[in-house]
Amino acid sequence: MGRRDPLFPNAAIVARREYRDRTRSRLFRLSTVILMTLALGVAMAPITLRYLDRSSVDVIVVVAPEERLAAATVATANGIMNIPRVGTDAATWMPPYVIERGTNLAAATEALGAGRIDAILEVNRAADGALSVVYRTAGPANGVLSQLAGFTALSVGIVDWTRSLPPGSQLGAFRTPEFRTESLNVPIEGGQAVDAVQIASRSFLGTVFIVLMFITILIYGMWVATGVATEKSSRVMELMISAASPRQLLLGKVVGIGGAGLTQYLAIALPAVLVLAFQEPIARAALGDAGAGLPTGGLTLGLLAAYGLFFLLGFTLFALIYAAVGSFVSRPDDLQTLSLPLSLIAMAGYLSALVVLLGGGGPLSRLASFVPPFSPFAMLARLMVSTVQPWEVALSVGILVATITVVALAAVRIYATGVLLYGQRPGFRAFVAAARRA
């Protein structure tokens, strides 16, 4: 047997620990790069889809027994389906649909089954003069294209009816009515109401932000709780509690582990957010005017700042609670018992924000935007899709900061009690009782 170095009696153990730490560090960096790549891919997905849509053209064949009826259907379908977006250069714009006249239904059906065309509009006239329009596809009908075909059928019916009126009729020719939507509670930018396209964009982005906030709080909050529970289970906590105060240990754990997690999160999310923020200029540079109108046009620096503020406050609140929860268990495996209620609370905040984003925000949603721990989710959702007064934002932030202060004081007391409790069942009632004593 070899002699052990008296100066380094645990050299093998130290080497194994260093190897384990290096392996963890490499895995952490590798996972960060992989997740960053995935996030950038998701952020670039709308531009990629727009490029693929631009390069593909749907062919629709119109089959009708009357020449005049077929011509009217082709003209109406072109007027409804092939409308260029606002600001598109007419010289470079390509219609997304090719509407062709077909004379044989059987031949058109065979071409549809073979994949040479994408859809068939069959128009027939009944004995009483009414029109019957059938929209055929090879597989499941595309929702947007089905709606456009329905609008085409209605418009053809109206045009056909007006043409059948006797000469000199007082009704005159049919004219398409002007249509617009208005809302009383919309965001205001530069003194003007945000239009419907940007509101739809903000609703989409708000959903992305809320999902990111919800997932990040659950993942990195559990990191904090697991770090506390691991130190407690290894008995390292008994040495640390004699060298530092519970307040220092708790805040150090939240700032240390939470900061490490947020560093990874920023490395993953920041490039994706920048791509989202500048997606429309990127699309215009890559695709020309056809790339305009992407679902991120409503993103502003103010909304990004609001997301960062409410995300940081919400994470701090939950991280403090998770740290107190982690101090109350004897093993990391027991964390699920106490972390489930916190997950349900975060889920409630997430659902309240979705209600606002889907247009169902009422008194309860407005109340949730002031009540922690729901306010980080609900207030961010309100900022994205509705008008929020500055005093409401200030009040929500003030209440949230005050709540974080109170929770921090209580968490320190709970942490000081829980880290020295071993062998007890980590029930939720015991945690609530400790919180009351704190």
Image: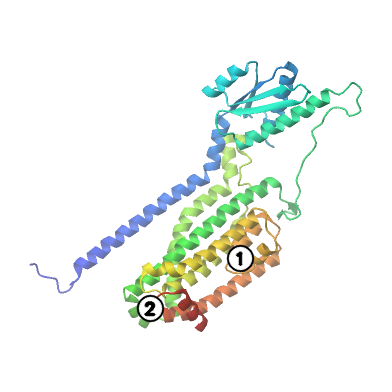
Which label is found at residue 248? none
Q: Crowdedness of circle 1 by 10 Å Cα count: few (<14), some, many (20+)?
A: many
Mark 2, Cα crowd under 10 Å, few <14 / some 14-19 / many 20+, is few
The structure residue drawn at horizontal position 19% and vertical position 66%, both measured from the top left corner, is 12
Q: Is residue 330 above or below residue 87?
A: below
User: Is residue 247 shown above or below 173?
Assistant: below
**Furthest residue in direction left, as rendered:** 1
Q: Is residue 345 left or right of residue 70?
A: left
Q: Is residue 265 visible?
A: yes
**Pick the front one: 306 or 102:** 102
For marks 1 and 2, give the one nearer the viewer: 2
Judged from this view, the residue extending furthest toward the front is 127
Residue 285 sits in which quadrant? top right
What's the amino acid at mark 2?
A: Gln
Residue type at tag 1: Ser
Q: Quadrant of residue 128?
A: top right
Residue 225 % position (x, y): 42, 69
Lower position in the chain sequence, tag 1 or tag 2: 1
318 shown above or below 266: below
State the scheme by which the image is colored: rainbow
The residue wearing badge 1 is 375
For mark 2, give the secondary structure: loop
Residue 178: image location, x then y, percent: 79, 38
Q: Residue 424, labelled with which disc?
A: 2
